[in-house]
Image (cartoon, helix red, strand yellow):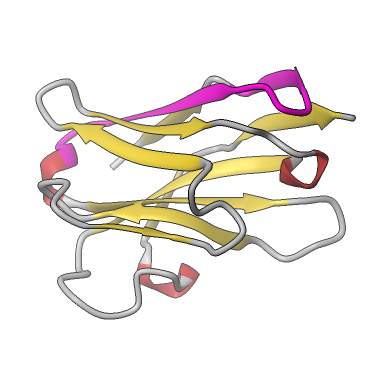
Amino acid sequence: VQLQASGGGLVQAGGSLRLSCAASGLSSYVMGWFRQAPGKEREFVAAITRRGGSTYYAESVKGRFTISRDNAKNLVYLQMNSLKPEDTAVYYCAASPSLYSGDYYSRSEYAYWGQGTLVTVSS
């Protein structure tokens, strides 16, 4: 499956951005968002189950970010509010064909990755 992330950009602290990820056959996959800041490892941000019934978030973004999906449009979204400079990173969408329960937070569970979109939050 090919994943195409978009929506990144430059925003001031306190602002909002919405990232999108397009993927064919989206309903077959658990979808996740990860991010990687310069000099740091890629980290989990959020995940959503196939029908959108359950969502999972990193503690650092809980209450500020919302993951959602529209299987009819083959799109998954990450709405990011109250952005902070520490949210600056390249954001990647990822798809897992095999997750049904378990570690939604682990990179190794996701087989397919998009190319990433850069989010820069200025202070």
Q: Percent position (x, y) of residue 75?
A: 27, 27
Is residue 35 shown above or below 43? above
Identify the residue at horizontal 64%, vertical 33% (top origin): 82
Question: Can you tell which quarter of the image residue 46 is in?
Answer: bottom left
Judge by depth and name the residue closer to the eye, 112 or 83: 83
In the image, residue 3 lies in the stretch drawn in magenta? no
Question: Can you tell which quarter of the image residue 78 is in?
Answer: top left
Judge by depth and name the residue closer to the eye, 118 or 81: 81
Q: Percent position (x, y) of residue 22?
A: 33, 27
Identify the residue at horizontal 20%, vertical 27% (top origin): 74
Identify the residue at horizontal 20%, vertical 52% (top origin): 29
**Left or right: where does residue 102 sit relative to residue 67?**
left
**Left or right: where does residue 120 sit relative to residue 21?**
right
**Left or right: where does residue 59 sit relative to residue 76?**
right
Q: Percent position (x, y) of residue 31?
A: 31, 50
Total labels: the figure holds 0
Question: Can you tell which quarter of the image residue 92 is in?
Answer: top right
In the image, residue 25 lies in the stretch drawn in magenta? yes
Identify the residue at horizontal 62%, vertical 23% (top origin): 8
Is residue 64 shown above or below 12? below
Judge by depth and name the residue closer to the eye, 78 or 72: 78
**Left or right: where does residue 74 sit relative to residue 111?**
left
Is residue 7 shown above or below 100? above
Pick the quarter of the image with the C terminus: top right
Q: Percent position (x, y) of residue 1?
A: 28, 42
Range of residues picked out in magenta: 8-26
